[in-house]
Image (cartoon, rainbow, N blue to C red):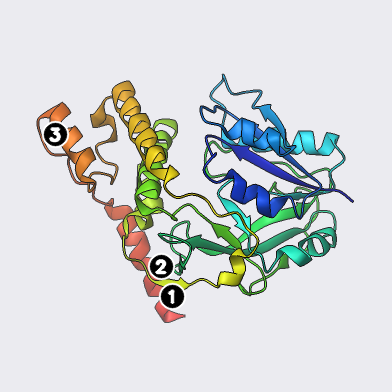
């Protein structure tokens, strides 16, 4: 048996020491694939004996699924039997690390490991409690390969682990956050998370222009500045190298620059119906470029009626 961590990444130097400090205690190898990278991520990974390769399809509008497919292909060639699929800004809680190898190695071919997914909120002392949008809940983070599993051809938001095409085995589920969880650092700095999310909203609209409704609904939870939160347990972080959050101030500027580049590329009015104009800086930029305020997006009546019908059915049940 061989456990390999599969890591797609892009400009993640701020969080990679945290990821590595957790993963090196569990995985036999870490393999990383990137589409593009302008910071020191590659140097950090190579200094920690991580196998680093470029996405072979990166010049042809590569997707996250391309990276994951390539990672799995490389992992199989290197003899991997069990795979971990955390993103760079995610780590296993310290409470899980001592038993992680035993639990993952016990997975049988085709079986996945599902664990609580906790979004840290504005630091490491609290996490977001809601399960709306793409926030906390149970998610698949590891699997035992059956040599038939593969990723679906989705451009954006594909599965973390590959689909099981041949057999269906009951997944291993850990649902006690004190026993084990995956700590997601996406919202550890709220302003950083907002601009990063806006960049991806704009990027997704370019890639899938007919999914405006789903983009706005899916990212709506990002713009809730005061969500319901719970306190984290300090024991979850023992032994981990925590990130220097001051680095994220520069990352915010990078994302703002990339957002403006998309505005230049497509014209700012292309993004007018995205729900991103509550950010004063972006609204000022829209007014500057167009001479008017952006129109307000309204959820189509079809979706409102469908949501109302679902709520009625839930009440009747």
Residue 206 location (% of width, % of height): 40, 31
Tag 1, which secondary structure?
A: helix
Q: Which badge, 3 or 1, comes first in the chain's sequence?
A: 3
Task: Report the front residue among 276 and 188.
Answer: 188
Residue 253 location (% of width, % of height): 35, 36
* Residue where numbered disc 1 is placed: 314
* Residue where numbered disc 3 is placed: 287
* Residue where numbered disc 2 is placed: 310
Residue at 77% from the left image edge and 50% from the top image edge: 27
**To which quarter of the image does residue 304 belong?**
bottom left
- Residue 21 visible in the snapshot: yes
Tag 2, which secondary structure?
A: helix
Residue 212 location (% of width, % of height): 35, 42
Circle on res. 305:
none
15 displayed left or right of 194:
right
Q: Nearer the viewer, mark 3 or mark 1?
A: 3
Task: Report the front residue among 107 and 49.
Answer: 49
Q: Are marks 3 and 1 in contact (CB under 8 Å)?
A: no
Residue at 28% from the left image edge and 44% from the top image edge: 276
Marks 1 and 2, how far apart at CA? 6 Å
* Neighbour tally class for label 2: few under 14, some 14-19, many 20 plus, Cα within 10 Å: few
Q: Are marks 1 and 2 in contact (CB under 8 Å)?
A: yes
Residue at 19% from the left image edge and 33% from the top image edge: 285
* Neighbour tally class for label 1: few under 14, some 14-19, many 20 plus, Cα within 10 Å: few
144 displayed left or right of 268:
right
């Amino acid at each position: 048996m061989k456990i390999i961590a599969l890591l797609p990444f892009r400009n993640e130097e701020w969080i990679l020491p945290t990821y590595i400090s957790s993963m090196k205690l569990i995985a036999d190898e870490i393999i990383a694939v990137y589409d593009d990278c302008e910071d020191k991520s590659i140097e950090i990974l190579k200094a920690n004996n991580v196998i680093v390769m470029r996405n072979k399809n990166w010049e042809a509008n590569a997707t996250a699924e391309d990276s994951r497919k390539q990672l799995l292909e490389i992992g199989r060639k290197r003899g991997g039997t069990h795979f971990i699929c955390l993103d760079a800004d995610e780590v296993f809680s310290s409470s899980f690390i001592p038993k992680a190898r035993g639990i993952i190695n016990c997975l049988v071919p085709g079986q996945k490991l599902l664990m609580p997914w906790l979004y840290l909120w504005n630091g490491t002392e609290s996490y977001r409690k809601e399960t709306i949008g793409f926030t906390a809940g149970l998610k698949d983070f590891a699997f035992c390969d059956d040599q038939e599993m593969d990723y679906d051809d989705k451009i954006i938001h594909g599965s973390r682990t590959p689909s099981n095409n041949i057999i269906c085995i009951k997944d291993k589920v850990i649902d006690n956050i004190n026993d084990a969880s995956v700590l997601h650092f996406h919202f550890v700095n709220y302003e950083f998370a907002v601009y990063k999310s806006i960049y991806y909203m704009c990027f997704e609209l370019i890639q899938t222009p007919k999914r405006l409704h789903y983009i706005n609904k899916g990212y709506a939870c990002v713009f809730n500045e005061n969500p319901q939160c719970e306190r984290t347990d300090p024991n979850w972080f023992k032994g981990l190298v925590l990130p220097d959050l001051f680095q994220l101030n520069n990352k915010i500027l990078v994302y703002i620059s990339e957002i403006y580049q998309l505005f230049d590329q497509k014209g700012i009015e292309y993004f007018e119906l995205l729900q991103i104009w509550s950010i004063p800086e972006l609204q000022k930029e829209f007014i500057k470029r167009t001479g008017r305020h952006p129109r307000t997006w309204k959820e189509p009546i079809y979706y409102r009626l469908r949501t109302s019908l679902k709520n009625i059915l839930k009440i009747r049940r």
